[in-house]
Amino acid sequence: MKNKPVILCLEDEPEVRDAILRDLAPFKPVARLEAADHVEDAKEVLAASAAAGEPIGLILCDHLMPGISGVEFLVGLQQDPAYAQTRKVLITGQAGLEDTVRAVNEARLHHYIAKPWTAEELQATVRDQLTEFVLATQDDPTPFIGVLDGPRILEHIAATGRDK
Amino acid sequence: MNAAKQNKWLTVKSVGGILAIIFFFIPFFFPAEGLSVAGNRMLSIFLMAVALWITEAIPLHATAALIIMLNILLISNRALFSLPDDFSAPPFASFFATLASPILMLFLGGFFLADGAAKFKLDRNLAKTLLKPFGSKPANIILGMMLIVAVFSMFMSNTAATAAFMAVVLPVIAKLPEGDRGRAALALCIPVAANVGGMGTPVGTPPNAIALGALNAQGINISFVHWMAMVFPFMLIVLLAAWQFLVRVFPPSVKEIKIEINSTYDRSPQAILFYFTAGLTLLLWFTEPLHGISSAIVGFVPVVVMLSTRLISEKEFHSMQWSVLWLVAGGIALGSGVGATGLDEWLIGLVPWDNVPVAAVAGMLALTALAFSTIISNSATANLVVPIAMSLSVSLGDEMSRVAAAMFVAIGASLAMMLPISTPPNAIAYSSGQVKTKQMALSGALVGTVGLLVFILVAPRVWDLFGLMP
Amino acid sequence: MVTTRTLLERLHEPDETVEAHLVAELDRLLGQPARQQAAADEILFQQGEELGGVIILLEGQVKLYKMINEQEVVFHSQTVGRLLGLLALSGLAHAFFNCRTITPVTYLRISVESLDRALQHSEDLQQVFLTVIMRSMARRSTRLVELQAEVLALNKNLARERDALAQTLRELQQAQSLLVESEKMATLGHLAAGVAHELNNPIAAINRSADFLQADLQALTAELPEGGVFGEMLQRALTHKPLSSREQRARRTALAEVLDDDTWAETLVEAGLEDVADYERLVTGLTGSRAERVAQLGRYYQLGSALRNIKGCSQRIAGLVKSLRGYSRADQADAAPVDIHEGLEDTLCLFTNRLRAVKVEKQFAAIPPVHGHAGELNQVWTNLIANALDAMQDSGQLTLVTAERDGEVVVQVQDNGPGIPPAHQSRIFDVRFSTRQGRMEFGLGLGLSIVRNIVSRHGGRITVGSEPGCTVFSVCLPVAHQHSIPTRNPK
């Protein structure tokens, strides 16, 4: 598949990052996994993906990190129309109510996963969110049927699909 | 990062675009001998269309629009560069008129019925009702699914039919044990049935419309029910063969399969109005010999009814598959251009056909269509091959009618289903992860072979026997 | 002998003269009206009673009062004067007050008709009578003004007392919430200590199991024919410091450029392979397609990484548990020598999640132990650090300094936050002081009053110096101060 959407995992602790990436391995056939350990690095990933023409489909973001917080990063991202369709998920054990409310209101946060997470929970969330992204942005969502939310994509194709 | 990707500017699409330009100018610099000025110009357009439709350098419907424009600019009575006086240039409006060809109106009627069926969930409800008699034995269930999918894809797009029924089948597949070959049978039966079923009616799939459009341009009108009478029985044979193949080669290990489709018929006044409209349209289509109202005119009935009663909302109207209609129109324009400029005769003249048996010519046509459409879009294939097939049939005298020639191409295009990229239904089944490419190739090869044999060797005799050949 | 005087002259005569003159004139004109007697505490007339004349008091005292809210309210006793029933005479006809005798009295009761008659006959009487009335009324109205002033003064006192009461109530409530909060902390401390203790076993088991797994895995790998390379991958993952995401990406990019294949490069990097040479060296002994061979290597690398992560993380948990136990131990224990640095380290460890964006600088000198309660002192450090972090909004520099000076241990907690306004500096140790406007953060920042309380119970003192960009809290504690220190909650 050309120009796969990117799943960006922003997490400062290498052990946790490893675990998240391994849990996301099932999505590799339809998405490229990228990791960043702080916000500056995440911005590099965004720039590189933009240069390669790969859309950012999903950002999984921890909240407490050195430097800028995850919520701060997501809020900043919301200003950029290039990421208007990007799905934003907070995965954290430490965001307080205030931060979470801010993330929802100002960064249009789509989902919140509390640590510790389970593989099922994380995968279900990513599957849902990436499906949402794919249906909103891809002309032909067919290649995503097997890995993402098949029934929903089929429903979409049944309503819009055409013969060629 | 992505270093490799950045280096790959040499993509299929960019190559296609460059080739299209080169192809376009070849006849200008090296005109074909024995071909008129207009014929050479048309050859330019045709070569360019081949490059663009095969590589999809620009969207398929964009190529169609480009063909219509180039036809007008190069070979119509308003051509930018003057044409010899002995050439009677077709009026430019006739190329624009392809966008409103009667056959497109018929097709449009099909779109409206299909959209309505999806909107009121008639497809799934009917499927539930129709699937009941097939019990729960896997082989029977698969037969039932195939018949139902085929019937639905006769009226709606093959892609939509596949998507709708894959959603039903995938949960069933998930319950089969890992590695069960029955998974492949269940996952393959849907796209196969949809691809094959598309042949069944004029509105089943775009190649049919392209064939009918080309015939229509030459003054031959095939009614809805006439097409069905010619194709449907043989389509059933192909379908049954595919069924037997699937259940024998990929037999499910379980004794029983339960398919759950939970829904009930919509009984709102709107839904009932739709049922009535759909029923009336189908009835009129099936009874054309009795009343003589053209199926294109009948096809406009659901359009008018469903728009004026808002069964199809403005938003739904905007999101209709307009690109398909443009694609078909481009094909019709290409065909009529090829015919009007004598390009077809020149092309046919390149090969001494006299020594070739008719069946071999027919087989070759269908095989060409099949081979092309295995790789490229079915509609593009039909667009490119139908004009040639029809002039070929003319040059053969009375031995093969133009109807049969056009039909063989349309059917050949529909029979191509060996690769995931062959058709959108195949892509859907493949993307579900339940089918391997090898399995798909195997079933596709069988369907292709059986289909070609049945349609090339058996069908023409039966048509003659029942006087179906116009 | 009665001499005729002007009204002005009369007004200057003493009361006795005027009153004697009035009685003499009445006796003269009305022919000695009968003297009446009444005992003490007897009612002469009642509020609302029709009097029909005046009463002239010759001897004894009475009081004028009204019944208000079923209580006797005395308006005049000293200021009554000799003439009673004046208000009734002035047109009301009915008595305005109740009149009760205080001592036995002698009086004259003169009807309106008799009075009228006498007044018509003597101009002198008119003057005397007028004088008596005026004096009486003047005294009464003065008394009214005094009464009014008294009421005002009373009201003022009342308001003052009410304010004082409300203030006391507020203080009580604050003291109570502090108490509740510190009780909560104490409970939480006990709980934490318990949980920390419970966590020790599983953590020990995880730690040990990870070691066992590693040993067994290495042994198992060594038995395989390809054990060499697999063992190398395992070891590589176990010993290498994990790459940062940036390094990982750089490695992938470099490899992608060499291989001209992004996905393949990604696969190799994820399998722990460093470059093409590395890949070629490792896969030579393996069988299968190139993807399968790399997958085999990758599996061992992933195993090693997972094991390394388990070990690393369980050690982190073990460290946290140790700090938690150190922090919360011995709240109720007797005073003992306390290692200040241990307490500071434990406290910092428990603040890990708030210290991510904070640079912590520790300037620890060699200091002797302090005699006291470790748990309580930890509470001091917790409060000071929490306040510093609050002030810096969790990003900046936190400096902890320890030193020994003049037989005292000095601990300084310093932050580079905005500082404490001079106006607040003198009040921050007050029980009532808070800049948090009623917001109670659970567990932390209980208030500097508690801190000062603990420090002074340890025989030490706490001071603050603050300017924008530098706030220092200094705690001085006596070294080896052997006297017994009272615990906070004496049993």
Image (cartoon, rainbow, N blue to C red):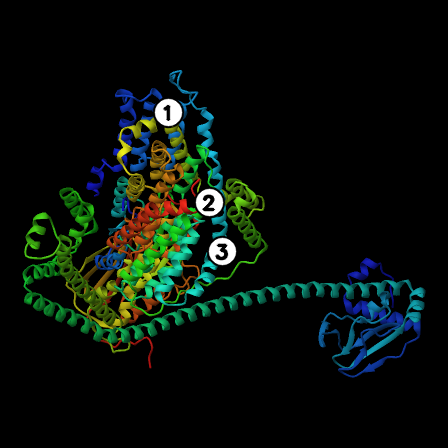
Q: Amino acid at mark 3?
A: Leu
Q: Which residue is mark 3?
A: B122
At which x and y percent is residue C236? 10, 58
Q: Quadrant of residue C362?
A: bottom left
Q: Which mark is residue B158?
A: none
Q: Residue furthest bottom?
A: C39
Left or right relative to B310: residue B415 = left
Q: Look at the picture and state if B92 lies above or below A110.
A: above
Residue B323 seen in this snapshot: no
Q: Residue at x 24, y 63 (%)?
A: C349
- Between A99 and B99, the one nearer to me in the picture: B99
Q: Secondary structure at mark 1?
A: helix
Q: How many marks?
A: 3
Which of the two marks, 1 or 2, is nearer to us in this view? 2
Mark found first going from the N terminus, 3 or 1: 3
At which x and y percent is residue A102? 40, 53
- Between C449 and B289, the one nearer to me in the picture: B289
Which of the two marks, 3 or 1, is nearer to us in this view? 1
